[in-house]
Image (cartoon, coloured by chain):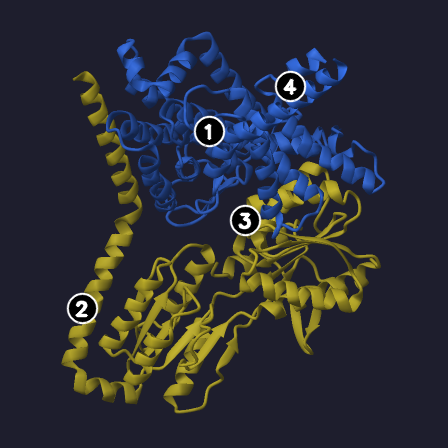
Chain colours: A yellow, B blue
């Protein structure tokens, strides 16, 4: 009997913790959902009530209803992307944004887009969780006469969208290569021996950044000693770098990390191995993404340079929507502007694909002013 | 000759032999590269801390070794595996970092609560998960795989919720201690050693080890003999959860953050593999804790060796699989029986010729 009571108690305790755990986190999630449903309902009511009126208002450009099906909120990068959309498409700017957080569930995302069609929004923005399986729903959008704008990730099996806005990973890689060349020239380093910590195998960011960087490396005849994947994680970067430090002891002077987290791990591993890195060190280290923490490291001189992967696509999307409203032809592929950051002004600017790109010298003000 | 036979017939001979086999690959590689033959095994003190591939194996293998302790008990007592340990690691790490940073904070250098509260909280979370699994398996007779499947999928998600779906960074030097160094020895090695020694003493010096084995061999008979079978199974799962909690703290301290999506990912499989590589039967019953620990370090030795050989990480799992197949085959009873028969035939032929 005693045992039964104990077991029931333990079960109850576990359930309580789980509920408490869920409750803690899902409070606002639940709140947002209800809020969303509420707004959706009102929006639906409004749409029904103003059905006749909507066309007029849309035409006169007073209020544009925009549906945004976001991937989720898994990283600081994603949060910044969401924030950017909410800032640009605010009520003050004359927009009514219907935001749905799909929590990385592609079925939810398809439903969200169908919901937008039913609400008869003016434009739909999608950050596709998966790249395939979109043709049917995009055809529905087309039939309803609602232009779709895709941001960040790509849709591979359909071209029934008005435009795509996102990052050019290859250019990021090229920029990194060009910077490294200019930096090495300025510092008088002739022999570059490079170690690369790649991102997740097959990810578009990994492919693009590798392709871009290798192009420059080949052109300049640099020696890439090794290239292993760190899976975009700190643990991965740390473990790969730990091994690099032993395999290529004293042979390398450049480490390229394909995202910030890998760079954090690599720095830990090099510190433990007694290898000096950064601006005053023996090893040049650069990373991609440029979230706030990485920029702080760059400002402190632990990272030589950071290449941005810009989550703030919304301003470009607004441009496209304005263009479409005015009945203009819009570009179907738009790349967001991406900056390059460096600790010092050794290299004032680089030329990528014939375009001059300035290297921004970091200050605390720049970091504080950034959204993520 | 008899001495050699005695050694080869020891229970732990094969696991140890396999581990050396893996490491021997490095000697061949180093010689082939024209380097010092034992450069893989060189341990030096650099930057005030121990440095070398062997240290890497011991250091990086700590989490799996800690998990393997709990997994061995679970396998032995319930003839099932606890597949939730990786997720529980992640949950414990998330809970610990959430306590240290405060809810909703994504990066902090100041601790919100004393370090010990966060760490004990994380470990306690592991225990709670272990108790949950234990209750399901021991008292409700749910199959271990099914029972632990619940937390396998849920624990990581709960961790994400606790961290408000963000990676929580605790950039405080005191928190780095558990994944850093104590004096000149990496702390994870010490933590793993302490866990192993404490559990080994507990199993050897008390009757617990015997109880666990007897429950594993025959639960009903043990009960009739006067053992509280359910309680023993429950304790095994509790210990497994505790170990997962400790491993979670170590993994999280290493990267001074709680990356719920990645901490302990696929570690449950490595822990189960460690138990199997140690020559333990997954069917429960008799077990060897030392075997599992050796198995855990063998897995890490394979990983470190592949890094050292410069095998591209894309194809590394293939080589890992091949090595595991070889090790498992060497230890398989039919293979052992075949080798024995062959040896016997040879001896017979020799004997016949002599006569």
**Which residue is label 4 attached to?**
B8
Do callouts 1 and 4 point to residues on the same chain?
A: yes
The residue that appears at 25% across and 27% down in the rendered structure is A10
Point out the tag, 1 or 4, that comes first from the N-terminus: 4
* Mark 2 / mark 3, whichever is N-terminal: 2
Give the mark toward the camera: 4 or 3.
4
* Separation (CA) of disc 4 from disc 3: 42 Å
Classify mark 1: helix, strand or loop.
helix
Residue wearing tag 2: A41
Whole-percent x, y for residue B315 in the image: 62, 51
Give the percent coordinates (x, y) of residue A109. Answer: 33, 65
Q: In the rendered structure, the residue with mark 3 lies on which chain?
A: A
Mark 4 is surrounded, within 10 Å at the Cα level, by few (under 14), some (14 to 19) or many (20 or more) other residues, namely few
Q: From the viewer's perspective, is residue B161 above or below residue B93?
A: below
Instruction: Measure the alpha-carbon separation of dots 3 and 1.
Output: 21 Å
Which one is closest to the eye, mark 1 or mark 4?
4
Residue beneath label 3, please? A233
Q: Which mark is residue B246?
A: 1
């Amino acid at each position: 009997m005693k045992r039964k009571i104990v077991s029931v108690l333990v079960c109850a305790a576990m359930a309580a913790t789980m509920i408490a755990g869920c409750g803690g986190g899902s409070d606002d999630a639940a709140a947002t959902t209800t809020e969303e449903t509420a707004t959706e309902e009102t929006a639906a009511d409004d749409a029904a009530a103003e059905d006749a009126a909507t066309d007029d208002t849309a035409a006169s450009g007073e209020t544009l209803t925009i549906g945004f099906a976001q991937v989720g909120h898994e990283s600081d990068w994603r949060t910044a992307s969401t924030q950017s959309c909410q800032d640009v498409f605010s009520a003050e700017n004359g927009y009514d944004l219907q935001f749905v957080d799909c929590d990385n569930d592609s079925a939810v995302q398809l439903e969200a887009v169908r919901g937008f069609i039913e609400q008869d929004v003016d434009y739909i923005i999608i950050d596709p969780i998966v790249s395939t399986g979109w043709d049917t729903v995009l055809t529905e959008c087309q039939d309803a006469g609602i232009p779709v704008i895709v941001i960040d990730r790509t849709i591979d099996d359909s071209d029934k969208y008005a435009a795509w806005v996102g990052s050019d990973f290859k250019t990021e890689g090229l920029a990194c290569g060009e910077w490294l060349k200019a930096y090495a020239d300025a510092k008088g380093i002739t022999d570059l021996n490079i170690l690369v910590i790649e991102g997740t195998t097959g990810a578009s960011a990994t492919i693009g950044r590798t392709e871009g960087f290798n192009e420059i490396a080949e052109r300049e005849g640099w020696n890439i000693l090794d290239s292993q994947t760190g899976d975009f994680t700190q643990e991965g970067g740390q473990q790969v770098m730990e091994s690099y430090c032993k395999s290529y002891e004293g042979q390398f002077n450049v480490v390229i990390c394909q995202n910030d987290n890998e760079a954090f791990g690599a720095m830990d591993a090099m510190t433990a191995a007694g290898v000096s890195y950064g601006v005053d060190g023996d090893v040049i280290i650069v990373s991609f993404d440029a979230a706030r923490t990485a920029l702080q490291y760059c400002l402190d001189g632990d990272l030589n340079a950071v290449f941005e992967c810009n989550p703030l696509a919304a301003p470009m999307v607004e441009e496209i929507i304005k263009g479409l409203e005015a009945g203009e032809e819009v570009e179907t592929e738009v790349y967001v502007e991406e900056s390059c950051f460096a600790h010092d002004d050794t290299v004032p600017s680089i030329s990528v694909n014939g375009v001059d790109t300035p290297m921004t010298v970091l200050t605390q003000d720049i970091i504080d002013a950034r959204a993520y | 000759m008899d001495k050699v036979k005695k050694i080869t017939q020891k229970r732990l001979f094969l696991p140890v032999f396999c581990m050396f086999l893996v490491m021997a690959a490095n000697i061949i590689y180093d010689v082939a590269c024209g380097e010092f033959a034992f450069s893989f095994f060189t341990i030096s003190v650099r930057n005030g801390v121990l440095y070398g591939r062997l240290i890497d194996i011991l250091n990086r293998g700590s989490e799996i070794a800690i998990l393997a302790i709990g997994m061995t008990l679970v396998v032995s007592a319930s003839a099932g595996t606890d597949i939730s340990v990786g997720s529980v690691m992640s949950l414990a790490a998330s809970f610990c970092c959430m306590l240290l940073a405060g809810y909703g904070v994504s990066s902090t250098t100041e601790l919100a609560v004393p370090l010990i509260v966060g760490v004990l909280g994380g470990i306690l979370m592991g225990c709670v998960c272990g108790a949950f699994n234990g209750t399901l398996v021991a008292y409700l007779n749910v199959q271990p795989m099914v029972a632990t499947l619940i937390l396998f999928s849920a624990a990581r998600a709960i961790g994400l919720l606790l961290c408000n779906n963000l990676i929580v960074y605790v950039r405080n030097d005191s928190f780095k201690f558990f994944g850093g160094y104590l004096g000149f020895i990496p702390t994870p090695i010490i933590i793993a050693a302490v866990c192993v020694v404490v559990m080994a003493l507990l199993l050897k010096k008390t009757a617990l080890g015997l109880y666990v084995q007897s429950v594993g061999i025959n639960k009903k008979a043990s009960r009739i003999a006067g053992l509280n079978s359910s309680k023993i199974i429950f304790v095994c799962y509790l210990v497994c959860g505790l170990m997962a909690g400790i491993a979670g703290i170590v993994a999280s301290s290493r990267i001074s953050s709680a990356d719920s999506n990645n901490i302990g990912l696929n570690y449950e499989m490595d822990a189960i593999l460690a138990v199997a590589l140690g020559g333990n039967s997954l069917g429960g019953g008799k077990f060897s804790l030392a075997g599992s620990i050796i198995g855990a370090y063998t897995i890490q030795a394979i990983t470190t060796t592949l890094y050292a050989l410069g095998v591209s990480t894309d194809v590394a799992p293939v080589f890992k699989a091949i090595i595991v197949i070889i090790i498992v085959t060497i230890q398989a009873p039919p293979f052992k029986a075949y080798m024995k028969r062959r040896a016997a035939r040879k001896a017979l032929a020799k004997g016949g010729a002599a006569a």
